[in-house]
Image (cartoon, rainbow, N blue to C red):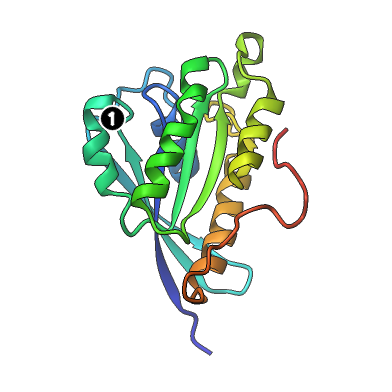
């Protein structure tokens, strides 16, 4: 029996300096660079992931610029996205405050089947935390999103967040939705996925 390979487009979104590039390089290359340069426009990496059923999933993971001047460019990449990781920095209130604006843009420009994971990044900076875990959980619940807290620096929960995203994305896009059917993204196992 031949194994099939599917390609999924994943976007990493969020304000500037929330750690999108570090998040991506930790997952794709298992590396971390302390003083990462800001992404100008967009960049991407490819990663092949072997699934439990033996099939291979190819991820095209887009790292988008968070600066306001690039938002119109970034929004062009929403079309055709299968999954979105929306990052905020747990030490920066403004990055959390903008989560609802990012979600509004996603709802306007992305497929209704797109899987969205909300991630509070930089949990290695617990001593500087400005956003309690419960606030992240609450906004994720309000919007029907999967929620994780992660650290691109240490790698904590990075693979778990991506694995959950891949699992939900493959489930959403391997079967067609009925006409006008909205797919809910709430976690079925009731777990919160954070540390």
Q: Quadrant of residue 79?
A: bottom left
Position of residue 123 relative to residue 63, above or below, is above
Horizontal placement of 165 versus 189: left or right? Answer: left
Q: Nearer the viewer, residue 72 or 119?
A: 72
Residue 169, image x, y percentages: 52, 61
Secondary element at image label 1: loop
Quarter of image, res 18? top left
Picture coordinates of residue 35, whole percent (x, y): 38, 17
Q: Tell me the residue at 33%/59% (across/down).
A: 80
> Does 19 sit left or right of 171 as displayed?
left
On the image, the x and y values in percent for residue 156 come to 63, 34
Residue 134, horizontal then vertical, whole percent: 71, 27
Q: Is residue 105 left or right of residue 73?
A: right
Is residue 23 visible in the rendered image? The answer is yes
Identity of the residue drawn at 43% across and 73% down: 5
- For this view, does 170 lie left or right of residue 189? left
Location of the C terminus by quadrant is top right
- Residue visible at 31% across and 46% down? 44
Is 122 situated above or below 80?
Answer: above
Q: Nearer the viewer, residue 98 or 74?
A: 98
Outermost residue toward the bottom? 1
Q: Is residue 24 visible?
A: no
Tag 1 residue: 39
Q: 70 and 46: which one is in front?
A: 70
């Amino acid at each position: 029996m031949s194994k099939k390979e599917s390609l999924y487009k994943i976007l990493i979104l969020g304000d500037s300096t929330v750690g999108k590039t570090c998040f991506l390089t930790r997952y794709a290359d298992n590396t971390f660079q302390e003083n990462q340069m800001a992404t100008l426009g967009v960049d991407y990496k490819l990663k092949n992931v072997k699934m439990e059923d033996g099939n291979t999933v190819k991820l095209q993971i887009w790292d988008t610029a968070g600066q306001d001047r690039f938002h119109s460019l970034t929004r062009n990449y929403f079309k055709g996205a299968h999954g979105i990781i929306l990052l905020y920095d747990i030490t920066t209130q403004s990055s959390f405050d903008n989560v609802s604006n990012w979600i509004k843009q996603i709802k306007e420009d992305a497929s209704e089947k797109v899987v969205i994971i909300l991630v509070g990044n930089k949990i290695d900076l617990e001593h500087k935390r400005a956003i309690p875990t419960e606030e992240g959980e609450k906004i994720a619940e309000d919007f029907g999103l999967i929620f994780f807290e992660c650290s691109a620096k240490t790698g904590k929960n990075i693979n778990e967040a991506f694995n959950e995203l891949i699992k939900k994305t493959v489930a959403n896009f391997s079967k067609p939705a009925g006409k006008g059917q909205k797919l809910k993204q709430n976690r079925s196992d009731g777990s919160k996925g954070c540390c």
